[in-house]
Amino acid sequence: MKLSNIKKTMETIRELPTLPLVANKINAILHDPKSSVSDLSKIIEMDQSITAKVLKLVNSAHYGLPEKVTNIKQAIALLGYRNISYIVMTLSVFDALKNFEKKSYDRRKFWVHSIAVGILSQNLAKECDFPLSEDIFTSGLLHDLGKVFLDAFLHEEFEAIVHKAQKEGISFIDAEHELFDVDHTMVGEWMARTWRLPLHVIAGIKHHHQEVKKRNGLSVSQDPFIDIIKLADVSIKAGNYGHSGDGSEYRPKLNKELFRRLPITKQDVEHIMGGLKQDLSKSEALLDLAL
Amino acid sequence: MEKKHEQQDIRLLGIYERLYRYTHEIVLVLSEKGDVLEANERSISYFSDDMTHRNIKDLFEGIELSLSSLFESEVIQNVIARTGQDKGQNHTFLLSFIPVDGVETKRELLVIGKDLSEAEHYKEQVESLHERVRELEEERKLTGKTRRSREKTLALSNALKKLERTKGELEKTNLTLTKELELAAALQKSLVPHNIPDDQYLQFAFHYEPMQFVGGDYYDVTDLGDGRKGLFIADVSGHGVSSAFIAAMLKISFLNYAQKIESPAKVLTKLNEEYCQVIQTGDFVTMFYAVIDPPNNRMTYCGAGHPRPIFLHRENSTIELLSSEGFFIGMFDQAEYRDKIMKIKSGDRFMVFTDGIIEAYSDDRGEQFGEKRLLECFRNCSEEPIDGVIENIIDKVKSFMKKSIFYDDLAIVAVEYKQP
């Protein structure tokens, strides 16, 4: 599978499916210094389906707010402009992905893995005193976006990778690299850029399998938050939460390199993972919205 | 022709000089070792002494990186650093180190610095006030309205007053930022040609309207000699000063390569190689470049993720969308581009545009203008002169949008191969 093949595939599908319009508008006003909270709430409220989903999610145990939220303006007041924008963006991505017809791969297990990485990334970030843990949650949640695309549009290649990984007990990415010269991080990066997802989300997708010195191309490439996402991904796989295409006998190792730039230890991670099951159960609403 | 380029260069130089002088960001030129060779007006306001010949690591705390290593990787490094106690004040800066390779054997570093102090300060204040308001709301719910309500109301009202004041200060900062955006918008507007002269073979018409904030659209027509013309259009995703900068750099690169390289695919390949290193913000650039050769009745073109141009074959009145397979610029440095060659005849016409036209949105109808409507317009105007076509299309787009807010630039260029 060459890079040019992906583009050819795109031509036959006409183009990468677009995000719901509300997401594009959100992007535009986020960059407009003159926009306000009421602009944001007006735009969201024009899309009834997204509004309903945002309110459902905001009122779920995932956010654990003390009172019921009945409108978008209230949601923005409680959670902030930035967080609500991310919620809308994430729900838009979910909707776009649902329209991808083909899926042989257990979508539920995939999203359990992704949500778990999101939650763990956020908790690790808080432990490390990193700011903007909501950003890191979104980044962790969408890190494997490319796999969904491969499953839908390069289905034969995708099956070949999953089959090889299972047969040889290796990881999805190792199987990818043995078979092809393009991998799910490149495909995911392309999707994320085309959909104009935020920079840190693109960075999480692009670099989550790379060693620090190999990461470049984005202004945040060397940022340690990516180490958090990488660590979370490895930990979630080791803990067997969900499934993201690796062979069932594959056991990733938590090596020292993962911790080198972070102010936490292996024991800290184990301790934080203790609370993960409970956090995951609070995120049922998010999982429902993805499926 | 050389004189024209000289004039263009002088003009661009003038613009950059003004930018260098008036920008709110500090701009420094350093030697390879980090000594300051030049500093703009803004930087002088931060450092009381004469800055030249001092080392950047003496002026700022927190610069750990090895300066010479920047030239090896050709990557722009961003560092957060603080100024020392020079004026008794501490400022936090976001510094971008950009290696400049190619002034003979002398290697220099360009440093652009943005003062983060104010923004950080207000951000922290707003976040803590936000937190406090939430705490107070929770307490109110838990402890009931009557208990210590007067104290609570007073505390809440004080917090709100403080929030209002901070909001006022943020608005002032906002105003400054808006002024900077206006400067960038002026720069961007100056990049595109304000008229494109016709020649014996081709007639051009265009419309360019940047919207509320700075976008990154750029188009150009360049004379390649022997009756050939190069038509180029690009759309830098994202908004703001960085998009305008990238569009400006693209203009220079494009004008440089177009004169030396015949094949549009090779030009796009060169631009892609360069911009993969430069664009670090997750943005991307779509572009389309066509070399129109009327004396040989031929057009060679190549696109990079750009909306497909629309071509009318006059002879049989067919309309064709010109597709090409290239990826957008700025992401995959191994991306491949291939030329497509087609025959053209007098009477033919074609149109390039950026996605602001297709994506123009109508709140009433809840949909975008779309490729279909654009094709229809183009087809319906096939007998009208080319500038009439552009006017017609822009009118239709604007009346489609009515009062809906514009989110993107409108840029469209049409070419007619004149009939004898």
Image (cartoon, coloured by chain):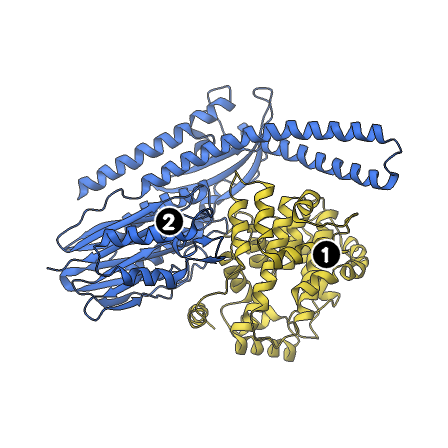
Chain colours: A yellow, B blue
The residue at the point 65 percent across, 71 percent down is: A107
In the picture shown, does residue B219 fall above or below B171?
Answer: below
Q: Nearer the viewer, residue B324 or B13?
A: B324
The residue at the point 62 percent across, 31 percent down is: B167
In the drawing, does residue B375 fall left or right of residue A191?
left
The residue at the point 38 percent across, 60 percent down is: B307
Q: Which mark lies nearer to you, 1 or 2?
A: 2
How many marks do you count on the picture? 2
Numbered label attached to residue B201: none
Q: Nearer the viewer, residue B148 or B93?
A: B148
Q: Residue B402: x, y in percent?
A: 43, 49
Q: Nearer the viewer, residue A230 or B387?
A: B387
Same chain under badges 1 and 2? The reply is no
Kind of residue indicated by mark 2 = Leu
Quadrant, the C terminus of chain A: bottom right
Q: Is residue B385 visible?
A: yes
The residue at the point 76 percent across, 61 percent down is: A280
Distance CA(mark 1)–CA(mark 2): 43 Å
Q: Residue A87: x, y in percent?
A: 64, 53
Residue at mark 2: chain: B
Pointer 2 local density, CA inside 10 Å: few below 14, some 14–19, many at least 20: many
What SS does tag 1 mark?
helix
- Tell me the quarter of the picture where residue A206 sits: bottom right
Residue at mark 1: chain: A
Numbered label attached to residue A120: 1
In the drawing, does residue A231 fall left or right of residue B255?
right
> Which residue has dot 2 on it?
B410
Pointer 1 local density, CA inside 10 Å: few below 14, some 14–19, many at least 20: many
In the picture shown, does residue B213 fall above or below A148?
Answer: above
Q: Residue B409: x, y in percent?
A: 40, 47
